[in-house]
Structures are given as C-alpha cells and as structure tokens.
Image (spheres, rainbow, N blue to C red):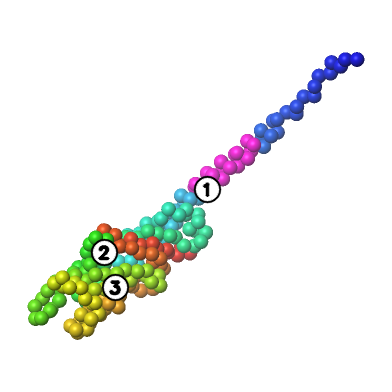
Amino acid sequence: MSSNAAPPQSPPRRPRRRWFGGLLSVLIVLAVLGVVGEVLLRGVIDDRIAAAEAELPAGVTVERDDTLALVQVATGRATLRAEASPEALTELARSAAELPELEVTPQSGNLVAQIPLSIAGSEQNVDVRLSVAAENGKAVLRADTVEFAGISLPLDSVAEQLGNEQLNQLVEGVAFPEDASEVTISSVRTTDAGLMLGAEVKIW
C-alpha cells in the first residue's frame, strides 16, 4: 500500500527573524547612546582639563589622551598628555634659583641649563645638565653636572666651592606643579621640544 502523504512542512522562521531584528535594533540604539555619551563626557573632561591647566605654568599645555571618556569618568580621573616648553622650564628654574639669566634648552634629547657664573674673577657661561623625574605626583628638575672648559664636574661640589646658594637650589630640585594641585604627574621624559609628561587630573 503506497502513501502519497506530503512531508511535514517546516515551521515558519518569521519569529526568529523578528527576534534577530529586535536585537539588532537594541544594539544600534545602545551604540548611538554610547557615541552620544562619549561626546558629551569628552566635553565635561575638556572643561575640567581647562580648569586644571590654569594651575600650571605658562608654556605647559595639556590634552586628553586616547582613553575612552566613559572609562575616565567611571574612574573619576582623566588621563592626560602634557608638554612643557623650554621657556616654561626656564621660568620655573629662574624663579626657584633666583638666576634671572639662566636659560634651559633641549640638546640631543637632554635638557641643559646655560648659566653665567663668576669663576676666577671673570664671568663665564657654563652648561649645567639637568635630569628630570616624576616624584610624588610632580615633575622634578635637578641639576646633575656642570661642564666648563671641557671638564664635567658634580654641580653640588661646584656650588659648595663657589658658595652659590642659587646653584644649590638646582641641585635640590625644582618641582611643578609647585603647590598642592589636583594635577598628578605620573611619567616624564625629555624630548627635542622640552618635556613630555603623562598626567592625571581629578574629575570629581
């Protein structure tokens, strides 16, 4: 006995397509909200950075790094890139050491302070090599050695022999931000344009 019954038909797939379409719509909405939220939060962070930048010396510029604004707001700290020009470093060192003729210049990836000193009764321009480090949330410039007539000497010894208190200040170090600040310096390195710093600032 033969059977001519038709094979059972597969169930319609419309419910699955509707489910997929609904999920896709939700994902699109979430993506749009995420983009809008990111843009708005960047504005909040930029305003906070502008307020923090006012605490820093002239010639120090600050901008957001590439970390998502959503992440920065969630942690309450904005991560930044900052640059300090040789002019800014010169002003800092002049003010701290009371050496109005001091000049900081970048040389071959290092920082050099050119200072006129009275040596053996005559004024000579000498090069003082500077080191820089991030310490306790601040960037600290220190004078390491002085170079004169092809000779390199420890600056602390030269300062002691000359009885120069201003040079001692450079040996001890010049820090910025100078006072209590919501800007925290986390890393620092010398460049041909001065200093490149990694920093954080409180948002809340």
Magenta stretch? 20-36
Residue at (40% x, 63% y) in the render: 199
Q: CA distance from mark 2 to mark 3?
A: 12 Å
Residue at (50% x, 56% y) in the render: 71
Earlier along the polypeptide chain: callout 2 or callout 3?
2
Nearer mark to the viewer, of 1 and 3: 3
Residue at (52% x, 48% y) in the render: 34
Q: Is residue 24 above or below residue 83?
A: above
Q: CA distance from mark 2 to mark 1?
A: 43 Å
Q: CA distance from mark 1 to mark 3?
A: 45 Å
Checking the image for residue 142, the label placed there is 3
Rendering coords of residue 25 (x, y %) = 60, 39
Earlier along the polypeptide chain: callout 2 or callout 1?
1
Label 2, secondary structure: give it.
Answer: strand
Could you tell me if residue 183 is visible in this image? no
Q: Amino acid at mark 1?
A: Gly
Q: Which residue corresponds to mark 2?
A: 110
Checking the image for residue 34, the label placed there is 1
Q: Is residue 28 magenta?
A: yes
